[in-house]
Amino acid sequence: MTLVTIAAKSIRQRWLASSLTALSIALGVALMVAVLVINGVVTRMFSQNATGFDMILGAKGSSMQLVLNTIYFLDRPIENLPYTEYLKFKQKKWVAHAIPFALGDTTEDGKFRIVGTIAEYFDLEYIPGKKFVLQEGKFLTDSEDAVFHAVIGARVARAYGWKAGHQFPIAHGGNTADIHDEKFTVAGVLAPTGLPIDRAVFINYDGFYKISGHEKPLQEAEIEEKARRDKELMIPAVQPGTSGPAGEHKASGKETMSDKQKQVTAILVRVKGSDLERSALVYLMLPLINKGSVAQAVNPIFQIRKLLDDVVGNIRTMLLVMTVLIIIVSGVGIFVSIYNSMADRKREIAIMRALGARRRTVFSVIVAESILLCAGGGLLGLVLGHGLVFVAGPIVESRSDILIDPWFFERQELYILPALLVLAIIVGLVPGLTAYRADVAKGLSD
């Protein structure tokens, strides 16, 4: 009979106390696993690889809010920039790509964000090394017959069951009581990315401004433009031959709309050059742009790192400390359970010794019990932890739009069982030494 078999039989003899002790370990491990998995998901979502753009331009305001509503669609958009500023900015020699975003509207039920953008957006990598892929249909184009086309994320398609060819209206400003008459047609469905892109509805930028009420009245636009001219602009005047503030832009439709009547919520910018050159350009250009009176420029990587360090990181540390304390308390429970049982097991230990068992054999049996309880509770905790994430995932997703994969395995989980084994050995030392020093004669006589 092996040491593990003897230890397992001893645990079965005290099944209630042993089960409760192992359960306390399992609950602590489950909580730790849930914290690790959810933190890992959130960290990946808000990581530097979550965007393929080097800079975001928007109206003056909160830098963090600009990043959250532009890249992650988690906050309300701030004020808009004039479309003419976008036309001027994209002419910069150091700008490789400038993508306008028009935000504010949502799907009819207010659940998903509508993003007005241009076809060029889908030609770029959404994260380094990853390009957009379609499940079905086609991407947006700049042709006149595609002005009311849309490309939807995988999460949107799954939630509504939409496919290519489906038509849908949108809610003005997210107000579900104010639904626009115009309808957009799903041209394509994006393959899942695991990023906020999955829960966005991308529509043609020109189509966004073909919707009644989206354009700014021309007289108001001209007054605002005159006011801006009186200030120091952040971007020099456009060179001859390019679109300028007074230019007219032919919308994809029958009517001609002045560029001055259009706006952009944000401009996603990718600069030219190698990674090192791009980083240097961003570092140099951010303060120059922010000195202007019209717009602000932010580095999305910096803002997200700040969010992770200042908020998410502190919460994660606090939760992990709590779960470690829970596991330590559970370890103390194992110690108390085994140590208290030693008084009832003196005769059992004495018989084992009388039958020829060595002191170290008895010691090893006690330590093996502690290891079995910790290992069993740890394995159960791993299963319960992922089960907890499986149950909580949809709730978190519905409340925060953060997509959580319950089958995601965080690398730190690999350290849980080895740590529990160390804890088990430490916890089993004192009861084991008590058994090691037990008096055989006194145990048999008692």
Image: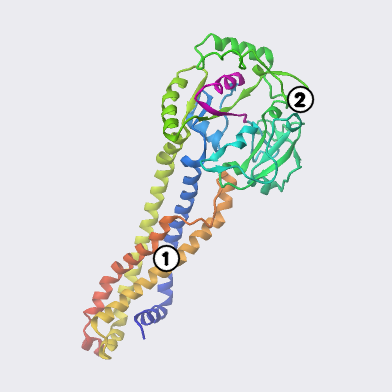
In the image, residue 406 sits, relative to residue 339, either above or below, namely above
In the image, residue 415 sits, relative to residue 103, either above or below, namely below
Q: Name the residue under label 1.
A: 378
Q: Which amino acid does label 1 sit on?
A: Gly
**Nearer to me, 400 or 277:** 277
Q: Which portion, as a residue range, is magenta?
A: 83-103
**Nearer to me, 379 or 277:** 277
CA–CA distance between discs 2 and 1?
64 Å
Query: Residue 82's image quarter?
Result: top right
The 10 Å Cα crowd at callout 1, few under 14, some 14 to 19, many 20 or more, is many
In the image, residue 184 sits, relative to residue 263, either above or below, namely below
Q: Which amino acid does label 2 sit on?
A: Gly
Q: Does the magenta stretch include residue 84?
A: yes
Image label count: 2
Q: Name the residue under label 2.
A: 253
Query: Residue 175's image quarter?
Result: top right
361 relative position to 136: left or right: left
Image coordinates of residue 226 in percent, x first then y, are 59, 9
Image coordinates of residue 190 in percent, x first then y, are 64, 44
| Residues at marks 2 and 1 touching, judged by CB atoms closer than 8 Å | no
Q: Which of marks 2 and 1 is nearer the N terminus?
A: 2
- Is residue 163 in view from this perspective? yes
**Nearer to me, 209 or 212:** 209
In the image, residue 89 sits, relative to residue 170, either above or below, namely above
- Is residue 446 in view from this perspective? no
Q: Does the magenta stretch include residue 423?
A: no
